[in-house]
Amino acid sequence: GYRTFTADHLLYWGWAGGPTDGPDVPAGYRLGPAHQSSPVADTVRASFADYRNHYAANPLLDQALALEGYVEWVEQLLISDAATTIVIEDPAGLVVAFGVVDWSPEDPDIRLAAVHPKVQASGWYGHVVRALQREAEARGLLPLLISTQSGNVNVMRAWARRGFLPVRTL
């Protein structure tokens, strides 16, 4: 009475430390810790609305609710003492990019990072990941992990440019 399917392959990449050089964010933008009032949830909804995550492989799951699960996940991490959320806000207060690292596992893990669709392919993702790398190095908590689905090749290219290497597949 059961139906099985492959939900996807989750690929983990790790960064053991190294150069974190790169340009500063433009004047007028704020890169730093998220405030509880930061509109991160809006950026999660916009960024992951059409994302083909592992929940999308299950035809029994409502995709809109799966997206709200991502929002809840980020909101819980945002208020957690075990996580750091970095945002880039534009002068109007829009969170153009964010990243959340969970320090609680043995190897810290960037649980989620994204760029608002309005400004994708503008270098914001690199700024956020670089900030999380610097934070991990400052804390002496390496390697820093990050993961994605096997089809998300563009983000894996971005990680490779930032010095991450593939470490495991689930």
Image (cartoon, rainbow, N blue to C red):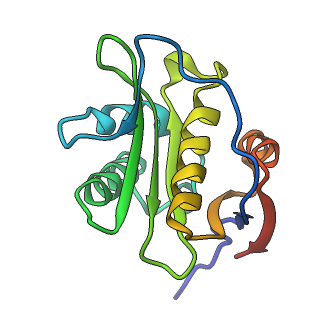
Q: Position of residue 110 (x, y in %)?
A: 53, 58
Query: Which quadrant does the C terminus fall into?
Result: bottom right
Residue 37 in which image quadrant: top left
Q: Position of residue 154 (x, y in %)?
A: 76, 39
Q: Position of residue 122 (x, y in %)?
A: 64, 18
Q: Looking at the image, is 76 positioned above or below residue 39?
A: below
Regarding residue 54, the answer to whether it shows in the image is no
Q: Nearer the viewer, residue 33 or 47?
A: 33
Q: Looking at the image, is 25 positioned above or below residue 110?
A: above
The residue at the point 79 percent across, 51 percent down is 163
Q: Looking at the image, is 89 positioned above or below residue 66?
A: above
Residue, far bottom: 1
Q: Looking at the image, is 82 positioned above or below residue 69?
A: below
Regarding residue 4, the answer to whether it shows in the image is yes
Q: Position of residue 8 (x, y in %)?
A: 68, 65
The residue at the point 69 percent across, 31 percent down is 22
The residue at the point 42 percent across, 60 percent down is 61
Number of numbered callouts drawn: 0
The residue at the point 64 percent across, 35 percent down is 126
Q: Nearer the viewer, residue 145 or 26?
A: 26
